[in-house]
Amino acid sequence: MTEAKAFAAYADDQPLAPLSIDRRTPRPDDVAIEILYCGVCHSDLHFAKNDWGLTRYPIVPGHEIVGRVTSVGSDVTRFKTGDVVGVGCMVDSCRTCSACQDDVEQYCLNGFTMTYGSDDRHDGTLTQGGYSESIVVSEHFVLTMPEGIDLPSAAPILCAGITTYSPLRHHGVGEGHRVGVIGMGGLGHMGVKLARALGAEVTVFTRSDAKVEEAKQHGAHHVVVSSDEEQMKAVAETFDFMLDTVPVQHDINPYLAALRYDGTHIMVGLMDPIEPAVQGANLIFKRRVLAGSLIGGIAETQELLDFCAEHKITCDVEMIDMQTINTAFERMQKGDVRYRFVIDMASMKNAA
């Protein structure tokens, strides 16, 4: 065991505070990593506040991790000390079920092991995430950071990036497709960049006039203010795909009406019941599909990192110190970030 400094949530009504945690001695297939940067995802806030009823305290959030290898187990072949690597939302799965064999470990039939908040499959300990100095992860779930990629802004690619890239790739988005991206936050701005790089014509749907120019600056060909009925009527039955990144309840019926026949509406943000109800006629009369998608497999995530390096795609980030994480959580809850906080883990050296 190695002791590591971390920041943890101790209860749903308490701010994050310092905690010393134990990191295991590397197993034969393990990679030990010094964490350099860690993105701050809205899921971290949900977990800290136990919004989903899954949290066991104390919990160390963080699943957008970029770091440097400090040691490897005896069976590791892909990494060596000094390599710069990434770790995303998963650190294990059963590896034998049909989903794992199909390289979609996020749909593991026996449940994937989350980077934090899961029981380790081998020793039963609670996994703890990237708001810490170090982490130890099985080689299979460690990603290579391609040469030339900007490391701080690459951290959120491991969650926000893959969450939007995976459904675009799965549904074959490319040249000639018209894609609507609903929402212009951490997920949405990555969806715009990725869909455009894949060759699609991209339209951002936003409720705010203030985000029109902002969306275009990020590569959107068009912007529709969804609260404007005339603008929504003008785009009826014109889109092949809708990438819905909004994490709170919202009426998806107007967006379904904007899809062509055989169009697909993909949910990646909302975990709660869809309210108001979906009108069946919006699906049936145009053979539309309402779909969902969860992050991406390890092979696909590596593909995404390489794709972003090739196309010079970055996530827009604001760097913070670990000591200001509670302020960042407050700002994130208010939507006051463009578009992702990333913690410079060098600040952990000053942590209590």
Image: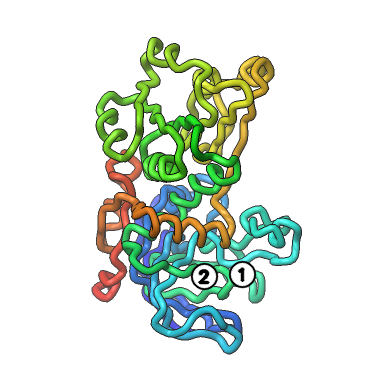
The vertical placement of 235 against 129, above or below, is above
Q: Is residue 57 left or right of residue 297?
A: left
- Which residue type does callout 1 highlight? Asp
Q: Nearer the viewer, residue 315 or 227?
A: 315
Q: Is residue 314 left or right of residue 297?
A: left
- Which residue type does callout 2 highlight? Val
Outermost residue to the bottom: 74
Q: Position of residue 300 (x, y in %)?
A: 55, 57
For the residue labelled by badge 2, is the local secondary structure a helix, a strand or a loop?
A: loop
Number of marks in picture:
2
Residue receiving disc 2: 142
Residue beneath the point at 25% across and 31% down: 213
**Quadrant hosting residue 215:** top left
Residue beneath the point at 54% across and 83% down: 26
Can residue 126 be seen?
no
Q: Position of residue 344 (x, y in %)?
A: 28, 65
| Quarter of the image with the C terminus in it | bottom left
Q: Is residue 105 left or right of residue 97?
A: left
Residue beneath the point at 69% across and 58% down: 102
Q: Earlier in the sequence, mark 1 or mark 2?
A: 1
Q: Position of residue 121 (x, y in %)?
A: 66, 70
Rounded to the nearest angstrom, the CA distance separating label 1 from label 2 is: 16 Å
Instruction: Using the image, tell me which numbered label, if any, was put on residue 128.
Output: none
Q: Is residue 302 left or right of residue 29?
A: left
Q: Position of residue 288 (x, y in %)?
A: 63, 24
Between tags 1 and 2, which lies in front? 2
Residue beneath the point at 40% across and 12% down: 229
Can residue 90 be seen?
yes
Instruction: Using the image, tell me which numbered label, if any, was put on residue 120.
Output: 1
| Category of crowding for the residue at label 2, using alpha-carbon neighbours closer than 10 angstroms: few (below 14), some (14–19), many (at least 20) | many
Q: Nearer the viewer, residue 163 or 341?
A: 163
